[in-house]
C-alpha cells in the first residue's frame, strides 16, 4: 500500500492536480491557457446555445437558466449546462492564486475571500448540472437550481468584495514607501465588483417589493418595469462579464509570484522585486 502510494506520488499526477486546483500555477498558464478556455466554455457555449434557442432569446430579459432548461431549450440545453460547469471548474485555481497573492495584505480577508469564491464556484458547477427534466414536477428541481444559482452569485460576490478589501489594504504604503499592489488593480476590481452587485441587489429588491403588493410601490414598479434596472437577467450577464474581467485583471495586474517574491510598487510608480 505504501509502495503504491510512493509510486503514485513520484509520477507527479496527484501532486500536479492538487497544485493546479490550489492555484499554484504560473501567470502565463492563466493568461494564455485558462482565461481563453474559460471564455470559450462559458461565453462561447452560451452564445451558441442562445443562437440555437427556439424563438428569440433576448439576453436583457431572459435569464441564463432559460438556456439550461430542457423545457425552454429542449434541443441544446446540455451544451449550455456542460459549458457552464466546465468554465466554473476551470476557474477554481483562481481562488488559491488570489489567496496566495493577497495574503500579505490581509491573511484573514484573503482566506475568507478564497473560501467564499470557491463555494460560489462549486454552487455554479452544481447549478449547471442540476436542471429540471421534462418529467419533473414544476416546483422540485427548479427551486434547487435557483437556490444554487443564488448561492453561487452570493459566494462569488462576497469573494470579490473581500479581494477588493485586501487590495485596498495593500495600498497602504510601507515605511519604505512601497505598496503591495498597483493602484489600477484596486480601481479595476472596484469598478468590476460594485456596479453589478448593486444593480443585482436593486433588481432583486424591486422584484420582492412588487411581490409584496404594497400600494406605495405600484407607481415605482410601473415606472421601472421598462428599464434595464428591473430585469435581473441583464445584471446576470453583466455580472458574468464582470467576473471574467475580474479574473483577467487578476492574472495581468497581481504580482507574478506569491509572498516570497512579490513585485511591490514604490512611491515613484515602478515595480521592483523584494525577496
Image (tube, rainbow, N blue to C red):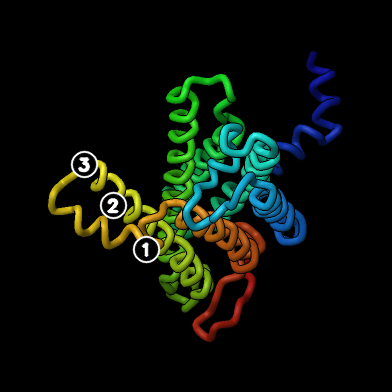
Give residue 166's mark. Answer: none
Quarter of the image where the N terminus is located: top right
Query: Which one is closest to the eye, mark 2 or mark 1?
Result: 1
Left or right: 105 in relation to 248: left
Q: What element carries label 3?
A: helix
Q: Name the residue under label 1.
A: 227
The residue at which mark 2 appears reads as 206
Residue 15 lies, in percent from the top left, at 75, 36
Looking at the rendered structure, the secondary structure element under dot 2 is helix
Q: Is residue 15 above or below residue 247?
A: above
Q: Name the residue under label 3.
A: 212
Residue sitting at 71 percent across and 43 percent down? 20
Q: Is residue 131 above or below residue 159?
A: above
Would residue 49 be found to the left or right of residue 270 on screen?
A: right
| Residue 168, placed above or below residue 13 | below
Mark earlier in primary sequence (2, 1): 2
Write down the quadrant of residue 275 in the picture. Answer: bottom right
Residue 96, horizontal then vertical, whole percent: 59, 47
Q: How far apart are marks 2 and 1 (CA)?
A: 12 Å
Q: Which residue is drawn at 41% across and 71% down?
A: 172
Amino acid at each position: 500500500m505504501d509502495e503504491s502510494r510512493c509510486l503514485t506520488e513520484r509520477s507527479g499526477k496527484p501532486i500536479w492536480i492538487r497544485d493546479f486546483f490550489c492555484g499554484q500555477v504560473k501567470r502565463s498558464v492563466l493568461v494564455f491557457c485558462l482565461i481563453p478556455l474559460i471564455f470559450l466554455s462559458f461565453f462561447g457555449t452560451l452564445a451558441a446555445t442562445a443562437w440555437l434557442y427556439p424563438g428569440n432569446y433576448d439576453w436583457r430579459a431572459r435569464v441564463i437558466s432559460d438556456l439550461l432548461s430542457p423545457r425552454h431549450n429542449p434541443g441544446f440545453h446540455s451544451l449550455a449546462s456542460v459549458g457552464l460547469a466546465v468554465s466554473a471548474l476551470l476557474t477554481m485555481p483562481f481562488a488559491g492564486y488570489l489567496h496566495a497573492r493577497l495574503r500579505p495584505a490581509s491573511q484573514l480577508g484573503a482566506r475568507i475571500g478564497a473560501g467564499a469564491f470557491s463555494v460560489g464556484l462549486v454552487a455554479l458547477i452544481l447549478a449547471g448540472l442540476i436542471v429540471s427534466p421534462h418529467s419533473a414536477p414544476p416546483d422540485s428541481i427548479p427551486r434547487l437550481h435557483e437556490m444554487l444559482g443564488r448561492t453561487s452569485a452570493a459566494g462569488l460576490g462576497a469573494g470579490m468584495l473581500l479581494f477588493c478589501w485586501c487590495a485596498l489594504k495593500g495600498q497602504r504604503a510601507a515605511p519604505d514607501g512601497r505598496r503591495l499592489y498597483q493602484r489600477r488593480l484596486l480601481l479595476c476590481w472596484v469598478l468590476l465588483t460594485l456596479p453589478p452587485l448593486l444593480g443585482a441587489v436593486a433588481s432583486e429588491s424591486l422584484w420582492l417589493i412588487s411581490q409584496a403588493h404594497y400600494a406605495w410601490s405600484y407607481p415605482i414598479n410601473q415606472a421601472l418595469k421598462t428599464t434595464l434596472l428591473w430585469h435581473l437577467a441583464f445584471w446576470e450577464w453583466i455580472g458574468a462579464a464582470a467576473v471574467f474581467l475580474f479574473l483577467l485583471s487578476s492574472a495581468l495586474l497581481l504580482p507574478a509570484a506569491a509572498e516570497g517574491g512579490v513585485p511591490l510598487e514604490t512611491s515613484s510608480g515602478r515595480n521592483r522585486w523584494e525577496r
